[in-house]
Amino acid sequence: MSSSTLLGRREELNRMDESDLFMELIRDVANELDINVLCHKILVNVGLLTHADRGSLFLAKGPLEDRYLVAKLFDVTQDTEFEEAVQRARSEEIRIPFGVGIAGYVAQSKRIINIKDAYKDPRFNSEIDMRTGYKTTLILSMPICNYEGDVIGVAQIINKTNGSHEFTDHDVEVFQRYLTFCGIGIQNAQLFELSVLEYRRNQILLNLARSIFEEQNNLECLVTKIMTEAKELLKCERCAVYLLDLDCGEAGHLEKIVERPGKSIQESRKPLSRRESNNIDMEDILQQHAGEDSKFTMVFEMENGTQEAKIYRPTSGNLTSPLGQIARYVAATGQILNIGDVASWSKRQVFQVGTEPTRSILCMPIVNGQRSVIGVAQLINKDNGFSFTDSDVTIFEAFAIFCGLGIHNTQMYESACKLMAKQKVALECLSYHATANNDDALKLMSDDIQPADKYNLFSFTFIDFDLTDEDTCKATVRMFTSCDLINKFHVPYDVLCRWILSVKKNYRPVKYHNWRHALNVAQTMFAMLKTGKMEQFMTDIEILGLLVACLCHDLDHRGTNNAFQTKTESPLAILYSTSTMEHHHFDQCVMILNSDSNNIFQNLSMEDYRRVMRVVENAILSTDLAVYFKKKNRFMELIDEGEFDWQSEEKKELLCGMMMTACDVSAIAKPWEIQHRVAKLVADEFFDQGDLERLQLNQQPVAMMDRERRDELPQMQVGFIDVICLPLYKVMAETFPWIQPLYDGTMDNRKHWQDLAEKVEMGLTWIDRDTIEEPVEEFVSIEPKDIEFTVTTLNCAHADKKDAPTPESKSALGRFASLRKGGRNLGKGVRNRLSRSLYSRSNSEDTSAAQSGTPSSGQQPQTPASGGKGSSKALIPERKNRNKLCLLI
């Protein structure tokens, strides 16, 4: 507003009466939200109302325990321009503690002071008059309060312009009434100013968050951006960031990546605490942490007049300097230090940063998501020369949080890049060692491959025990050639041979889930496709995928199941939360296919490649019995509905999954002598896992993996057949009758296992060694003598009367009857001892009978009609004796 306009405005106001003038001046300040403009208007208007020469307005700042006044505008007359007043206040910032001077006394006491001779009041500071040349005589000072009665400022007017030698009571009343309205306006303007400031802070924090996500690949650029924003918002001369060495290497970060949330992390989360300068002494810091190695690895510094950070690795001198010691203290304690007066706090000569003395310090820890200190941020010297306020601490704390997240994420990103590079190197090494030897591949290429029927590949009773390792590879090649997959998909023969040998090489030498198990599963799939005529439902690309999946479905199996991986929290369980081992098998399959000279899919089109990999993945994952149980009911529903069209993608995937399960458990359908040997291998592998669970995890294994419950294996085999195998084979045989041999073989083996289970229940021992060998009826530890059975008959007078046993027959047969009736109620140990007792007593009776002249086996027993007593002795080979004893029991 121009001076002529102001003059006209003033003349207009002077023509008003007091009440109109008062209301007009209230309206003048009522809607003003700029705190500087408002204060200027208040002082000018107060001069008009009271005829004061000049005035000053102070606003209250600081915490409750350390309140002070700051001169918002100083020595404003009715002719003082707004810009001039603001500039003067900024250049001569005056800070008055509560209780000091006239204004400080008014603020503390909330009293009105009307002084007629300022120089006679001891609270008056004449230095300002001496500096400005102005003579202060009259002073009227009055508190400005908010609606709660708290002092938010002090207004002070000096000298009269109308020749009066004092401020009258009327002046005091008008001044007080006007300041009541001004207090409302000032508080509204302050709230508006806070909201604007908060908006600016939020914008800066949003920009900071954006910077964090944009600069995750460069730690130096990220920290520089954060420091620039912090200096700009908090108005300080210097900013520094110290980064700690927190084992930020690849191994340390990988460990943090796979670490599960737990109690230890929760316990480490501690809230940051603030400590002011008077709470801790500099000497304590120097003495307490003089011997500690804080391991600061990098320091970023940014000073006034530059937008670039100075980055260096700290020397011992940097770490032992006062600022370095403060940073080490904050890093060790996690406390926020706000030092307002470094000179008095340090009790020594003021230490300097560059050429500037250090006046104030705000030092704060930088933490990551786990509340672990990863660095320290320092702000040095406010631009206005004062200390850092609570508001500064709050803002800086937000900066520190963002800084911690950004630094942690960037370090994680850099470490992840190194891990990826190391992984690539490791995969290259693994690929080299996982690939078959060239000499072996050349040999397999040059060898003659026998026809499929020579290897018995078309039969569901295929046996691999008689095949050498070389023959197993040849049989695998024959399956691919018999399906004409080499010609259909232009698979180079050398690549196929090398791939087969590489797959074989990547199976571990565990007892069951090894290369030969994979061969058997693939052969069963081949037999189902050819002999079982399932190939009519499959495309060529699906046949290729199924054979590859069968050969690779247990790659790198460790002899332990998914539950064991979860219990031990192995890396595999962390990588794959479901179907853990099956996902790993598929990944190993992909790794081999991606290795040099192993990609048998190299000549497929992009679309065929996607399709075959989808078939392989779904097929391998289907070998997880948990997946089988999820899909079984849907498959049974389709069968019950009479489904015959399996060409839709969903139904084809379902059918392939059922076929994979049928092949995976097909050992249960092999001839009994083969099934018996395979059961030993499976049980031994399960028992080994059970031993690991007992030793490593201190847990009781489930029954099928508990070596101490090995006698229960026959009954568990029956349960496995009834729950998994028979329902699947039955419904598949009914729908696809050409695979009936799988169902028949399973039923036959079930009878054998059921027979053994019944004998175990009768008291016989299924196995008496640490590993499964043969059923007890097929071996004995000693060579027993022949057993003599004596049969006594009575001549009955009437045909309808029952034979009465003689005492001898009671003695001979009563033992067996007792065992037959009560054996099931006895403990297993008692039944085993009783079984051995039967052998012993039978042998002793045979010996005593021979010594007493018992008739030989050649003598004929007397007929019942003779009414006499006869005896018969049967000489039975050892194995038959045992079989008869089992049947008798």
Image (cartoon, rainbow, N blue to C red):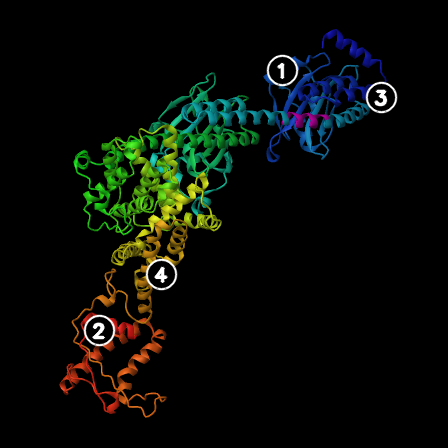
Q: Position of residue 653 (x, y in %)?
A: 42, 41
Which is nearer the N-term, disc 4 or disc 1?
1
Tell me the residue that label 3 is attached to.
Answer: 19
Circles 2, 3 touching at the beta carbon (< 8 Å): no
Label 3 to label 4: alpha-carbon separation:
108 Å
Q: Quadrant of residue 34?
A: top right
* Front residue of 197 and 146: 197
Say if the magenta span includes residue 763. no
Q: Position of residue 865 (x, y in %)?
A: 26, 90
Which is nearer the N-term, disc 3 or disc 4?
3
Label 1 to label 3: alpha-carbon separation:
33 Å
What residue is rendered at 32% in x and 38% in y? 589
Disc ID at residue 718: 4
Which is nearer the N-term, disc 2 or disc 3?
3
SS label for mark 3: helix
Disc ID at residue 881: 2
Tell me the residue that label 1 is attached to.
Answer: 88
**Where are the magenta residues, as a range?**
185-194
Q: Is residue 651 above or below residue 492?
A: below
What residue is rendered at 71% in x and 14% in y? 77
What residue is rendered at 44% in x and 21% in y? 302
Q: Quadrant of the C terminus?
A: bottom left
Residue type highlighted by circle 3: Ser
Which is nearer the N-term, disc 2 or disc 1?
1
* Residue 611 relative to residue 514: left or right: right
Circles 4, 2 touching at the beta carbon (< 8 Å): no
Residue type highlighted by circle 1: Arg
Q: Residue furthest right?
A: 17
